[in-house]
Amino acid sequence: MPNIIFLSLSENNITGAVPASIGELSSLEVVDLSLNSLTGRIPLSIGNYSSLRVLDIQDNTLSGKIPRSLGQLNLLQTLHLSSNRLSGEIPSALQNLSSLETLDLTNNRLTGIIPLWIGEAFPHLRILTLRSNTFHGELPSGHSNLSSLQVLDLAENELNGRIPSSFGDFKAMAKQQYKNHYLYYGHIRFVESQAFFQENIVVNMNDQHLRYTKTLSLLTSIDLSRNKLSGEIPETITKLAGLLALNLSNNNIRGQIPKNISELQQLLSLDLSSNELSGPIPSSVSSMAFLSSLNFSNNNLSGAIPYTGHMTTYSASSFAGNPGLCGLPLTVSCPHNDPITGGETAEASNADEFADKWFYLIIGIGFAAGVLLPYLVFAIRRPWGYIYFAFVDRVVSKLSSLKDRKTTSR
């Protein structure tokens, strides 16, 4: 069948190796062999496809290195090699894939540093996930050149060093995504039906592995968790106003939580747990209304938890493991039993009590004046009183008649 352009054998129980003869199908635009039990190596002949746009071989047991011949797939838009047993480094030949929008190498045995050229080679890249490998070295600052990047997942590696301040320059994450675009590739129409490859990616959010498909174009997330990152959280990361999920947990990050963290108003999930963060929790966090998951546990945070507004929806587990924190929802009371501000001085409390007494006194005087003044005026000038109460009576009568009409109509 030399004229096949769409080959999908996904989710079967196919075993054995991928035959080298598959490279003879030179017209193929989509190859989907995912979710099988294929073994052996990726055949070099796959690089013969001059029209290939989709290569999905994820969720198999393929081994060996990523073949350099994949760099010949000039039109390739999405490459899924995740959940295999691939080893070695990312071949430099892949930088020739200038049309690439998705690079998914998650859950393999890949090593080496994350190539510096990724930031320049893929101007259209939306999704970069290298999760669960053994990459080491520092985070390349040049990744900020990926102006279309919406999903960055480098979790569960051995990366070290600081988070580059340039990570605040991701343009696609700096704006809110309102319009959903279905990411379809290799769309083919038949007489009565159609076929296409729908882009998909698994994202770890709230300790759950979620597969995104139809709403993938709306997703914006950064996951750098479970590495060896150090330094402070760069203030520039708060410029990513469209970010929905941020996970920096299980690193060696120190310093304070940025005071303007609340500028990430679209954030749904924030996990900074198991680091070395210190200082107070910014009070502005309580204004992050969309935040459904929050984890500040196992740090060195101190002071009173700003337990107001949206913060009252989180349990003690979100703040546990911080010996210096106090106030609700923890059982540790703050000084002077003030869970919000960490306690006030006796002078401040007395001042408030004095202000309260004056407040109620003024309210009482105002109420008395409001009742007695009209009475005195109407007693002196009775016609005014008649006019006033006649007006009130007419208003009440109209309201009653409207209510009766509604009851009758029912």
Image: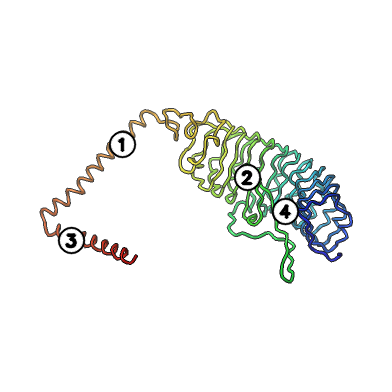
Identify residue type, mark 3: Ala
Give the mark nearer the N terminus: 4 vs 2.
4
Comparing 30 with 359, the one in front is 30
Identify residue type, mark 2: Met
Q: Mark 1 and 2 residues: CB-CB less than 8 Å, in contact?
A: no
The residue located at (18%, 61%) in the rendering is 390
Q: Mark 1 and 4 residues: CB-CB less than 8 Å, in contact?
A: no
Q: Residues within 10 Å of mark 1 (few under 14, many from 20)?
A: few
Q: Residues within 10 Å of mark 3 (few under 14, many from 20)?
A: few
- Image quarter for residue 238? top right
Identify residue type, mark 1: Ala
In the rendered image, the quadrant that contains the N terminus is: bottom right
Q: Mark 3 and 4 residues: CB-CB less than 8 Å, in contact?
A: no
Q: Which mark is residue 390?
A: 3
**Can residue 166 be spotted in the picture?**
no
Q: Which mark is residue 205?
A: 2
Tell me how far mark 1 sits from mark 3, CA to CA.
41 Å
Give the mark nearer the N terminus: 1 vs 2.
2
Q: Position of residue 386 (x, y in %)?
A: 14, 59
Question: Disc 1 or disc 3, which is closer to the eye?
Answer: 3
Question: Disc 1 or disc 2, which is closer to the eye?
Answer: 2
Identify residue type, mark 4: Thr
Tell me how far mark 2 sits from mark 3, CA to CA.
65 Å
Tell me how far mark 4 sits from mark 2, CA to CA.
19 Å
The residue located at (80%, 48%) in the rendering is 37
Residue carrying label 1: 355
Residue carrying label 4: 102
Q: Position of residue 31 (x, y in %)?
A: 79, 57
Tell me how far mark 1 sits from mark 2, CA to CA.
48 Å
State the SS at label 2. strand
Q: Which mark is residue 269?
A: none
Q: Is residue 262 left or right of residue 155?
A: left
